[in-house]
Amino acid sequence: MTTTEHSLPTSRLPHLPRLPHLDTLVQGSGPALLLAHGAGGGVHGNFGLVLDDLARDHTVIGPHYPGAGGTPVAAAPLDVDELADQLVASAVAAGQESFAVLGESLGSAVAVRVAARHPERVTALVLTAGFAVADPVLSLAAQLIKALAAADRWDEVARLATLSCMSATELAAIAPADLDAKAAQTLAGLPPGTVDHFDLVSRVDVRPDLGTLSAPTLVVAPTGDRLVLPESSYRLAAGIPDARLVELPGAAHMLSEPDRMAWLRHVRAFLGSLAVK
């Protein structure tokens, strides 16, 4: 598993004269998969359980948003158009002219914008625990995270993230004495750009893009998600022409290993169905 730095070919993206560098993981060979990770996470945090499997027969390209991985924190508020173009530039810099985009949580909105701005490059979309615009629960969570972080109450940010990203069943199975350890683990994994990511969560709105998309799309809805409610996934699927919807019964926002393996089976079946056409 390697992380490779690339210079970005801005001449191929003429509407953005200059693009900042994103620290990008490139692994495997074969048809390209461009990963769009969620807020307050990164490529390994979202996709680590399946990176090696996907890279067996795909070129996996995982750019880190500003403030995640090795990408510096942004100097200005994140812009979804620029972020979408940065992801595309990372894929082109890795030698990939076209690719499927796998978006998770905030990454689903970013993936939708990638497909809307660069339809000639996107061969398929997989949108997991996604949303086009934050619903009231997600909007409130983003506001709380920003307010707690501004007060330097990062322990509470981690507790909120732990509570939100696990299912009710998973939380019930944890002994109260172990919850602090779980929150500490969450805190250790929060990247420096967490607040910037959740600021974008609170502002992004790609609803106008949905009806314009032409790439084959799979929407995956974890039905136990307490941060991005499954209704947001249902609305994504309803808004994108001919999108397929699958549910992961009881799955949380952060997929457990069994749920991630079920996700992998659905994603492989979807991508395989496109390959045989």
Image (cartoon, rainbow, N blue to C red):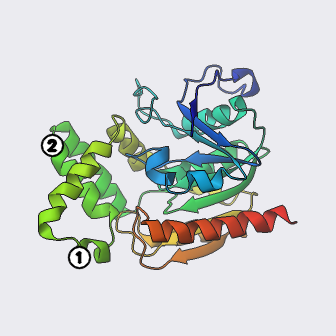
Depicted 31 relative to depicted 241: above or below: above
Q: Residues within 10 Å of mark 1 (few under 14, many from 20)?
A: few
Q: Of callouts 1 and 2, which one flags the residue occurring earlier in the amino acid sequence?
A: 2
Depicted 45 relative to depicted 80: above or below: below
Left or right position of 9 against 139: right
Q: Residues within 10 Å of mark 2 (few under 14, many from 20)?
A: few
The image quarter containing residue 95 is: top right
Find disc 1 in the rendering and name its residue: 172
Marks 1 and 2, how far apart in space? Answer: 25 Å
Residue 72, position as x, y percentages in the image: 42, 25
Q: Of residues 186 and 99, which is closer to you in this image?
A: 186
The disc labelled 2 sits on which kind of residue?
Arg
The disc labelled 1 sits on which kind of residue?
Ala
**Which residue: 24% across, 75% down?**
173
Helix, strand or loop under label 1: helix
Helix, strand or loop under label 2: loop
User: In this orientation, does residue 239 appear?
Assistant: no
Q: Residue 153 has which mark?
A: 2
**Which residue: 34% across, 62% down?**
165
